[in-house]
Amino acid sequence: MSTQPLTQGMVPKRLAHVRQLMRREGIHALLVPSADPHLSEYLPGYWQGRQWLSGFHGSVGTLIVTADFAGVWADSRYWEQATKELNGSGIELVKLQPGQPGPLDWLAEHAPKGSVVAVDGAVMAVASARNLGSKLQERGASLRTDIDLLQEVWSDRPALPQQPVYQHLPPQATQSRVEKLATLREALKERGADWHFIATLDDIAWLFNLRGADVSFNPVFVSFALISQQQATLFVALNKIDEQLRGVLEADGVRLRDYSEVAAALRGVPEGANLQIDPARVTAGLLENLNPGVTLVEGLNPTTLAKSRKSLADAKHIRQAMEQDGAALCEFFAWLETALGCERITELSIDEHLTAARERRPGYVSLSFNTIAAFNANGAMPHYHATPEEHAVIEGDGLLLIDSGGQYLGGTTDITRMVPIGTPSAEQKRDCTRVLKGVIALSRARFPRGILSPLLDAIARAPIWADGVDYGHGTGHGVGYFLNVHEGPQVIAYQAAPAAHTAMQPGMITSIEPGTYRPGRWGVRIENLVLNCEAGSTEFGEFLRFETLTLCPIDSRCLELSWLTQDEREWFNAYHAEVRQRLSPLLDGAALEWLQARTAAI
């Protein structure tokens, strides 16, 4: 979701206007998170307020504005990008690092007694608002959540998206919405809840077997859902639902109401009702509409765990999507090798050719995120995105990092591969090999069912730590089923809290993507998606293992093969044998020849 750089001087003017409103309202500090009322990762333009006000276009970051300070908190993935984009804006980059205060802690430490901190409660999670509110209260300050200052200054604010909603149908939809609603209602009974409010778009899309295109890369639509034991209500702009789909939904017991009516519906939840919500996935502003007599039953949305556990039928379609995606990658890489040195290739043209290869594949719907094609120094920025104004030409010697993915009716893909350009250096090869050793170590792991996923992180990092090297991002994220490429509840990252809801269960799909980044020089990341599979029981309990789903060669020309152990060589060769066996029937000509060459045993 790249945006053109702001005209010089635009950000200071916007900040000045916001500070004027803060003085009028008696606000000491304004908090602008990267969020919408659905707490989405990718935001429709209407809610990209932090980007609009700061000029920093990374997908994650938090802006704080006071009378004499403005800062964006961002993690290591965005430091180089933020440094460039914030230059001359009057906004500081505050680097998020372990042990250093995050934006909420900083606000609590710097808010004077009697001061007011403001945030638009419509885009702040209940849990975060409670956390900040209690910290401010300890200092004698207060949190205000009933105001959206940007609404007054953002004159050209984009409209809400209006893309049509459509059904996710069999055979790829392997369970009906009626069955999913019945299962959800049983889960609510077990929790002692008779109502349930859902704001997260991927939970809603999964539950109702519907998809849309309101959010870049994620096939979801802007909506809310309110479910009781008797009624399921979907709040969505009614012009997105055609008459045929409306009839299907009504026949399945789903009532439609306009998106704007959600506040009134929440006010209508009866006194004495027990309402299930996830405080990390519902915003404070929405819940302010509830009657005081409504009791909150708090915990993970039942749909979050349900959709993370793909069925055996789902897995069949996912494997087919991975085959089609792998075939598209083979066609792309065959073109790239032929074109290198013969025509001008840039990071932008790589994106164009790779997207075109995917578009030719059956079941393809869209990209699952912005393609990252990053040559040499650009690869050191994990979330780099080439633009027409700034991009590299692929020439000379070095490493090309390509991180890409697609949305297919039968699954969501996410893959990173390294390409040698000219002659990679010995140090570059060692970095690639070390990262591959991390991928192999975790891919081969066997682990207890129910282990908290953040605890697996050290398995991938151990071969990298052994050489005194590390990386700032997590090792793995959950992946949806023709849904969001980043999906909870599991996450493989030591930075994440090992909470009960992160337990690994059969059917979950997770990425394995360790890396190494040398700012100004190059970056390395290798990524596969894996599926949690049962691995038998012992006297110590049930165990799980990973099935590698991603099918695409890992280029051995980037590796220092002498660094691989015999076990690692055997894994590498077995993986390539499977890739060759499953992709060969889908390819011919140059792409098939490329596949055969790149899967030769080492």
Image (tube, helix red, strand yellow):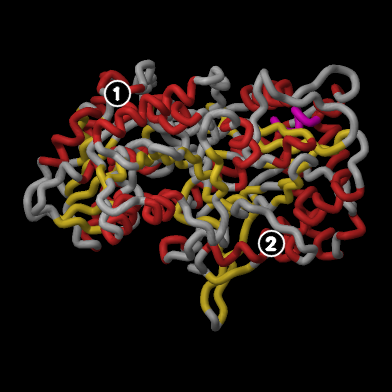
- At x 54%, y 35%, the residue is 58
Q: Is residue 593 left or right of residue 391?
A: right
Q: Is residue 403 left or right of residue 232?
A: right
Disc on res. 384: none
The answer to which image quadrant residue 446 occupies is bottom right
In the image, residue 230 above or below residue 500: above
Q: Residues within 10 Å of mark 1 (few under 14, many from 20)?
A: few
Image coordinates of residue 76 in percent, x first then y, are 61, 47
Please state the extent of the stretch shown in magenta in the rendering. Answer: 328-333
Q: Which residue is mark 2?
A: 461
- Whether the magenta-drawn stretch holds residue 95 is answered as no
In the image, residue 443 above or below residue 246: below
Image coordinates of residue 508 in percent, x first then y, are 51, 54
- At x 81%, y 65%, the residue is 567
Q: Which residue is mark 1?
A: 152
Image coordinates of residue 493 in percent, x first then y, are 57, 58
Q: For the residues labelled 2 and 1, say whether their Cβ atoms are less than 8 Å apart.
A: no
- At x 74%, y 38%, the residue is 401
Q: Amino acid at mark 1?
A: Glu
Q: Secondary structure at mark 2?
A: helix
